[in-house]
Image: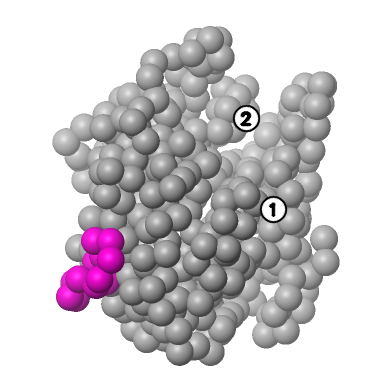
Amino acid sequence: MTGRLAFVESPVQLLNVLEWAHAQVTGAPGTPVAPGPSGAAPRGLAAVPGPRTPGRTAGGSPADGDLTVVVLSPTDPMSRGQLRRMAQLARDEGFTVRWQEARGGRGSLPRTLRDLAPLLRAAERIIVGDPFSRYVQLLLTLFGPQHLTVVDDGTATMEFAAQLARGERLVRWHRRGGLGPRELVLAPVSALARRRLAPGRRRTVEIFTSLPVDPPEGTTVTPHTFAWTRARFGPPRLTRGADLVGTSLVETGVVDPDRYVRAVADLARAHGATRYFAHRRESTDKLHRIAVETGLEIVRPDLPLELIARRGPIGRTVVSFPSTVVHTLPLALADTGVKVAVCAIAPEWLRENVSARAQGFLSGVAGTAAHEVDRLTACAGPSVERLEFG
């Protein structure tokens, strides 16, 4: 078997596959974990060098074997647009990108499996961005890889590592209740996939992450430092004002929409923010309401926020609710002098049916970031901890 095969379903996953490939060439160290307790080219790419020789990475060094990236295309337009732009960046780095309409209606699943079977059989290493994905889990049950790498897919990486270490079934942190009819049907697939995602006598597992994780014994953790992003973009021009980073916590049913909009307005006044960077899953209606009630300029990024912020312009202060960016932006914007403020999710903002597990997870996202940086004086408005780096 030869070659490396990556499956991505979001722009951030594809970015992190590029970061992983860059780290393989530049020699980022892996840290063995001790036993634990359990499209058109995007705007602003003028600074990016043109296409390289296939099989060569961003640093210009030969890649360690071929890398083929399979995009299991989602259906929502924002994700598809960002993915097409990220796919072009991957091609510019010399990698093969295969766009797979995996959700194209009746017959798409068997067609996808048939199309990808030869690649899966030949791959020595599989790289996945979302171990909770039913598509990825099904692929892993059919073709168990010898070497597996999981790259960051937001803060879900923390929950994945913890569930794997505890031997639990893989469930996204914001899901509520027990197994529904669909989950019951897919339970055998999920159970086998969980075993395929764990290290064993015939399988190595690597987690490439910028997040604090507690994975099972035998897993290798490779630090994700956003070295490729820093090499390709910036440093950015800084504006005088602040920028807010949106979240899809309303869309996932975690936060009450009225409370969220009021919190955004409070944060904008407290920090003098002028722009609101929308999450790709935020609804148009909610964004329109935010624009009308707060006066903020709504920005729909055409690339993951780490790239948008690195190429600039970006505010001297970036305000976010608990999300991946409180871990990733300090790395992507290292040595720029930008400050990040994290607004904790108050219990009264949560919807009535939100589980205690979800509340604890959100607190952990903000809390682990705060331990890595200095805490400054709390700001007016909602409870805020400011994180500074540079």
Q: Quadrant of the C terminus?
A: bottom left
Residue 307 in view in this figure: no
Amino acid of disc 2: Tyr
Q: Does residue 126 sit above or below 341 in this rendering?
A: above
Among the two numbered marks 1 and 2 on one chain, the one whose residue lies closer to the N terminus: 1
Q: Nearer the viewer, mark 1 or mark 2?
A: 1
Q: Report which residue position mark 1 lands on.
A: 78
Residue 268, given in percent of the width and then of the height, sits at 41, 71
Q: Quadrant of the N terminus?
A: top right
In which quarter of the view is residue 320 placed? bottom left
Residue 109 in view in this figure: yes
Label 2 residue SS:
helix
Numbered label attached to residue 147: none
In which quarter of the view is residue 25 placed? bottom right
Q: Report which residue position mark 2 lands on.
A: 135
Instruction: Write down the region rendered in magenta.
Output: 373-386
